[in-house]
Image (cartoon, grey):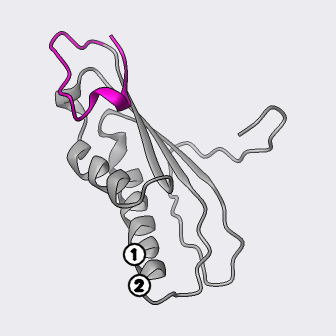
Amino acid sequence: CTLDSEVALRVGGDFFFDPQPGDSPVNLVLIAGGVGINPLFSILLHIADLHGYQEGKGNGHKLGTVKLYYSAKNTRELLFKKNILGLMNKFPGKITCCFHVTQQRSQICKELQPHVTGK
C-alpha cells in the first residue's frame, strides 16, 4: 500500500478468499498472530495452488501478490514456518512473509533470519 491507498480490513468471523477466473487481480496483506495463522495459512495454500495451476496450463485466474505478516513470541511458536518459507521460495515475489517475534531469547536460524524482525 502507499499513502492514501484504500484498503479493506476484516477481523475475525467467517472469511475466505475465492477469486474466480476473470476477476481482476488483487494484492492481499494477511496479518496473523500466534495460532490465528490457521485460517490465513489455508488462504495462502489456496493462492499457492492457483499460482501453480496458472504456471502449468493457465486457469483464467489473474493473481496479485500476497504479503503475510505473522507474529509470535519466538520462532518456535511460528506455526507452518517451514511451509511458508517453501511457498516464498517456490513463488518469489508473488508470496512474501515477514515474521515478527516479541520474546526471542535464542539465536534465530539462518534460514529465518532474513525474514524475522523483533527481539
x, y percent for residue 96: 45, 46
Question: Circles 1 and 2: CB distance less than 8 Å?
Answer: yes
x, y percent for residue 32: 42, 38
When asked about the image quadrant of residue 7, the answer is top right
* Distance from the alpha carbon under mark 1 to that under mark 2: 6 Å
**Residue occupying the point 36% across, 32% down:** 115
**Residue occupying the point 45% across, 71% down:** 51
Q: For the magenta stretch, what is the residue range?
A: 103-119
Looking at this rendering, what residue extends furthest in the right direction? 4
**Residue occupying the point 36% across, 60% down:** 42
Could you tell me the amino acid type at mark 1?
Gly
In depth, the one of 64 and 46 nearer the eye is 64
Q: Quadrant of the C terminus?
A: top left
- For the question of whether residue 19 can be seen, the reply is yes
Left or right of residue 111, residue 16 in this image: right
The residue where tag 1 is placed is 52
Q: Which mark is residue 85?
A: none
Could you tell me the amino acid type at mark 2?
Gly
The residue where tag 2 is placed is 56
Dominant SS of magenta comes to loop
**Residue occupying the point 80% across, 44% down:** 6
x, y percent for residue 62: 62, 74
Magenta segment includes 110: yes
In depth, the one of 67 and 19 nearer the eye is 67
